Amino acid sequence: MPGPFEGLRVVEFGRFIAAPYCGQLLADGGADVIKVESLDGDETRRNGAIIPGEGRQFLNKNRGKRSLAVDLSDPEVAAAVRLLALAADVVVANFRPGQAQRHGLDYESLSAENPRLIYAENTAYGRSGPMANTPGMDVVLAGYSGLLNITADGPLMPPEPIIDYAAGLLLAWGVSTALYTRERTGKGQRLDVALLQAALVLQNNNVNRVDVIDGWRDEFVEYLKHAFADGESWSDVLAKRADLQPHVPLRVYYGFLRTADGMISVAALARPLRLKMMEVVGFEDRWSRDPGWEPDDARAYAADLLSTVEGKLRTDTAENWCRKLASAGIPCGPMRLREQLLDDEQVLANGFVIRLEHESLGGLTVVAPPVVFSATPLAATRASPQLGQNTREILLEAGLDADDVERLANRGAIRVL
């Protein structure tokens, strides 16, 4: 069965993660995605390169696409690429500031000739404000946005570039929304997704303010203005925040807990689930049982409660505790490391990872398309392209003849295989 984007032409000027991942999702949906690369290729071809030109970070965000490797500084090449963009349904881009305008590949120039064009752009900090043209990467935005795990020794590096992937998902959702709107109006539009906004979305539970209970934030923010200049340590900062913010003993009900032979994850935030967890594990928590009661020292109470619960849990295995808790309707599971997931029975049973064959590298196991449709399925049918693998055929489609392509290849303006 054809995918939901069958028949759509997408031209992607994507680098690194967010824009390329959006392009991959569209390709999984059946769109013809042309990835425009420099003669050296997307930088991720060199990140963790397995063989020259084939890096792990390129393989997992560019499957199903066709590669057009060109030198956009060549006027003849730029004109041909512009024709491709003008004929596209969707352009996905994260150009450096000013680059799109130099080549006539900005939304204003393209939409003036193709008003049905959907132009999806990825920026770091958004299109307005003092940092509008400032470049940014996932780890930089993780620091700027507060999306970091802070310890007594300071902030920890994020284990995964989740801001980039969230932005890629938002871009793909935006493109889908714009395509739906175009079906009703006949008109395209530009959409923008900033990494900073994606980082805020990921913190939606906590990046908000309820005036009657969140006044403590004002004092904490004022304290932070001079804390480090005054010699405060990260431990001091964390302690200050803990002193100011409201405290409830939920750590034992939501998070990771140690058992006799490993860790389990528990999610029992709702009061009925907390009461069930008390019964299953065998402990008492007056704060949860009696909503009108509060301890004199909330932090000490929470620490004592955690110690008690983990002492109980250490008397049995993770498997047994998960079975007991699940029988009571409490969401829980064993803690796993990502290295275990490629062979996980649940992952395999649902087809959450798939096998692809790469022309240069052979077999690959990769994450499958993330949504299951009953009538218009997503499908990863081929691995990522080699650099310039499709340059010749794409330029012929753009209107150049075979002699033009050979001439451009001979003078080094394009890369062909």
Image: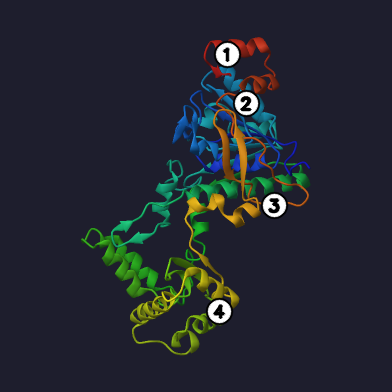
| Residue occupied by mark 1 | 408
Which x, y percent locates residue 242?
A: 34, 72
Which x, y percent locates residue 223?
A: 30, 66
Colour approach in the figure: rainbow
| Residue occupied by mark 4 | 273
Which x, y percent locates residue 237?
A: 29, 65
Which x, y percent locates residue 367?
A: 58, 46
Callout 1: helix, strand or loop? helix
Sequence-first tag of 2 and 3: 2
Q: Which mark is residue 295?
A: none
Question: Looking at the picture, does residue 386 appear above or below residue 415?
Answer: below
Of tags 4 and 1, the one toward the viewer is 4
| Residue occupied by mark 2 | 82
Q: Amino acid at mark 2?
A: Arg
Of tags 2 and 3, the one toward the viewer is 3
Classify mark 4: residues with Cα within 10 Å, few (<14), some (14-19) or many (20+). some
**Distance in Å between CA atoms under marks 4 and 3:** 31 Å
Q: Amino acid at mark 4?
A: Leu
